[in-house]
Amino acid sequence: MWPGTMAINLRNELPCAGPASYWTLLGGALSRKRSWLALITFCATAAMVVALALTVLLASVTVAFAVARTIRSASTSKPIAASKEDLSPGAIEEQPAGTAIDTFSGLVTDDHCGPRHDMGSAKTSAECTLACVRNGAKFSLVDGDKRYTLEGDSQEIEKVSGLRVTVQGSLQGDTITVHSIASQ
């Protein structure tokens, strides 16, 4: 018989003096039926519950930030007011197909570097864009995977190079003819 087993047997055989005795305060008689597997299972279950709770919390916070950003961007965008001349039948018919004025948003950069400028240089993205355009590259608008070449008033485009902008213009192929451009 093990020395520990003898102590357990002695403890289990001691008479208790009532419900508030020393042995019941310690958890009652020891049971040999509890195993390490039960302890490991309990700890693993508790860890999974905590991980699931943190995941739900993180997802909720992410959704809240996305909704707030969407609401903020919707409230800052200016609606385009149409004049009476724009709504006349003659004005609509005069515009050739494919030259409708659309609104685009994205980053103004150049078609040489794209959205990722050389990080080794000490230039900002605006300075790099202007340098590449002076060396023959064209201004471009990058929105995710979409890339458009920008044509229009180069001085207006230079003012917002390297910034996120909203462009109103007509799209033909992958070229936007800029009618107006404003930083976001």
Image (cartoon, grey):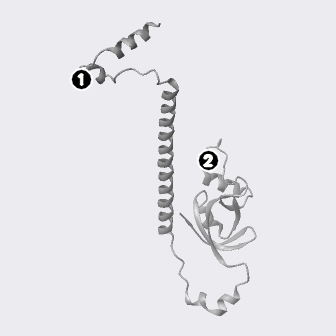
Tell me the residue at 70%/88% (across/down).
94
Residue 102 in which image quadrant: bottom right
Q: Residue at x 43, y 6 (%)?
A: 3
Q: Residues within 10 Å of mark 2 (few under 14, many from 20)?
A: few
Label 2 sits on a secondary structure element that is loop
Q: Nearer the viewer, mark 1 or mark 2?
A: 1
* First reached walking from the N terminus: tag 1 or tag 2: 1
Identity, as a three-letter code, of the amino acid under mark 2: Lys
182 is higher (above) or lower (below) than 46? below
Disc 1 and disc 2 in contact, CB within 8 angstroms? no
> Is the residue 68 above or below the residue 87 in the image?
above
Nearest the viewer among 84 and 42 is: 42
Q: Which residue bears the numbered disc 1?
A: 18
Indicate the position of residue 51 as horizontal and vertical percent values. 50, 40
- Mark 1 crowd level (few <14, some 14–19, many ≥20, 10 Å Cα): few
Looking at numbered disc 1 in the image, what kind of residue is underneath it?
A: Gly
58 or 44: nearer the eye?
A: 44
Q: Position of residue 55 (x, y in %)?
A: 51, 45
Mark 2, residue position: 123
